[in-house]
Amino acid sequence: MSRDVLISETNRRQLQQIIAGLSDGVILMEPDRRIRWANEAALAMHGVDRVEALGKDADDYAGRFSLRYRNNHPLTPEQYPLNRVAAGESFSDVLVEARAAGDDERTWVHSVRSLVLTDRDGEPESLVLIMSDITDWANAEQRFEKTFNANPAPAVICRLSDLRYIKVNPGFLEMTGYSRDQVIGASTYELDILEQAERKDLAIQRLREVATIPQMQAELRLPDGGSKQVIVAGQPLQLNDEDCMLFSFVDMELRRKAELALRESEERFAKAFRLTPVPILVCSADEQRVIDVNQAFLDALAYGDDEVIGKTVAQLDFIADPASRARLMTALEKAGRVDRVEVQVRKKDAELLECAVSADTVNIHDRPCYLLVLMDITERKRTELELVAAIEEVMKDASWFSRTLIEKLANVKKINAPQLPGVAFTDLTARERDVLGLICEGLADKEIAARLKLAPNTVRNHVATVYSKLDVHSRSEAIVWARERGLFSAGWGSRGQR
């Protein structure tokens, strides 16, 4: 063995001893692509304990291990780092995922660089691959990537060294309409996410200090030339040992549209409230304190605005009967609404109005309130009373009218009558039932007395008792009461047939 060969072998052994204990993996390969040696770190990064398990050469290695890039694209054999360095290529920081062929359980992520050692004549003597195990870092980055992309809040990450965007999540793309290519690599000058920010100077200062940027309103320019109101905030972080800023956004467009719709709705309500000729009062549900009234209310009750606003319904005392007011508000509290409840309303000058009150629950500025609408029915009530009085006069002797006419007149009379009383036909005595039946036949008191062989005064007493029990006030009402219950449908006197 020549001296040069001896020196070369000695140097190689010394080199191997030096690198054997390194944490970085090292693989030595001959210029003819044969794998000569690997340290323990390189073997561990492939899950083997002998250099022979790596393969005898670069082609054998490609058959034993499957390599792909981080984007899941597989490497062809020519792209394997061993073949690239064998071709004399110099490279650094190539990231590849490595796994043993047929083993999908274990995967390593290597950061690989090449080194070509030459002899005195400059010819390649040893080909070296130096690799770092960055599996833990890659897994952490992958978890961050998944979390970042799955985050429903729109977000971008800006690298602070050159103020360029290096990551964008689907939420930002969906919110703005930008494509990924339009964002990744763009600078903050091209896509200014802090444009028209309410505290832009503070945001820029925090960027320079690599400090948290508090929430602030801003306006994002969109690719179609429009803009969008957003809230933006920034959080510093490090990616690949570089200072970055994570910007997250809240889309204010939906909120802005909702606020605009609410404002328009409130404006429409306010106009309708003011211009409606029917008196309307709005009070709080908890204290029943008057919040607002329209002009029709002030005109109808002869109040001034300052005499009404701020007072409770009880203090204002415009419902004449306190018991009626209490029943109205109790029903409103229980059911949330009431419909056409008749009450007497007192004007400021003490004049009384007959009103039908309808009320409902509304929310004003997230506060439950009652809206009371007063319909003046004074004239209608007066007309109805006059009509009822006329009908009563006409119907004093029901025996001269046909059954159909009696029913129609009685029903007209009952416009304002209460609901059917709870009394039943069986609540009448046998004699009272006989009297009611003869009334329904159209007989007068004298005729009933003759038919039942009773004194006229006794018949009149029975008729009065029947009226009292049935809560009616005339023969026609008694006939209608029995008719509504299907009583005495067959029995009508000859005069009742006219």
Image (cartoon, rainbow, N blue to C red):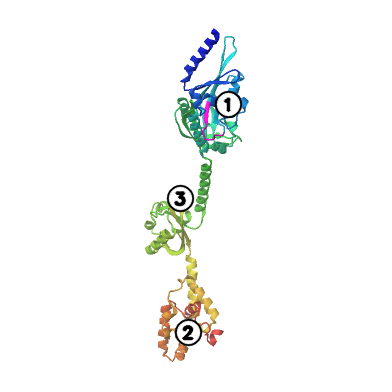
For badge 1, the amino acid type reads Tyr
In x, y percent, where is residue 42?
51, 24
In the image, the segment drawn in magenta is 102-110
Closer to us: 37 or 374: 37
Query: Which residue matches tag 3?
Result: 364
Measured in 3D between alpha carbons, the distance from the residue under mark 3 to the one under mark 1, in whole angstroms, is 76 Å
* Quadrant location of the N terminus in the rendered image: top right
Rendered image: mark on residue 462: none
Query: Which residue matches tag 1?
Result: 61
Residue 298 image-quadrant placement: bottom left
Measured in 3D between alpha carbons, the distance from the residue under mark 2 to the one under mark 3, in whole angstroms, is 59 Å
Categorize mark 2 by other alpha carbons within 10 Å: few (<14), some (14-19), many (20+): many
Check if residue 106 falls in the magenta segment. Answer: yes
Measured in 3D between alpha carbons, the distance from the residue under mark 1 to the one under mark 2, in whole angstroms, is 116 Å
For badge 2, the amino acid type reads Gly
Question: Considering only vertical position in the picture, is 278 above or below 415?
Answer: above
Q: Secondary structure at mark 1?
A: helix
Of the numbered discs 1 and 2, the one sitting upstream in the chain is: 1
State left or right for residue 118 relative to residue 469.
right
**Residue occupying the far front of the picture:** 1
Find out whether the residues at labels 3 and 1 contact each other: C-beta distance under 8 Å.
Answer: no
Of the numbered discs 3 and 1, the one sitting upstream in the chain is: 1
Q: Nearer the viewer, mark 1 or mark 2?
A: 1
In x, y percent, where is residue 494?
54, 87
Q: Secondary structure at mark 3?
A: strand
Of the numbered discs 2 and 3, the one sitting upstream in the chain is: 3
Closer to us: 204 or 134: 134
Query: Which residue matches tag 2?
Result: 437
Question: Considering only vertical position in the picture, is 72 above or below 283?
Answer: above
Secondary structure, magenta segment, majority class: loop
Check if residue 471 falls in the magenta segment. Answer: no
In x, y percent, where is residue 108?
52, 30
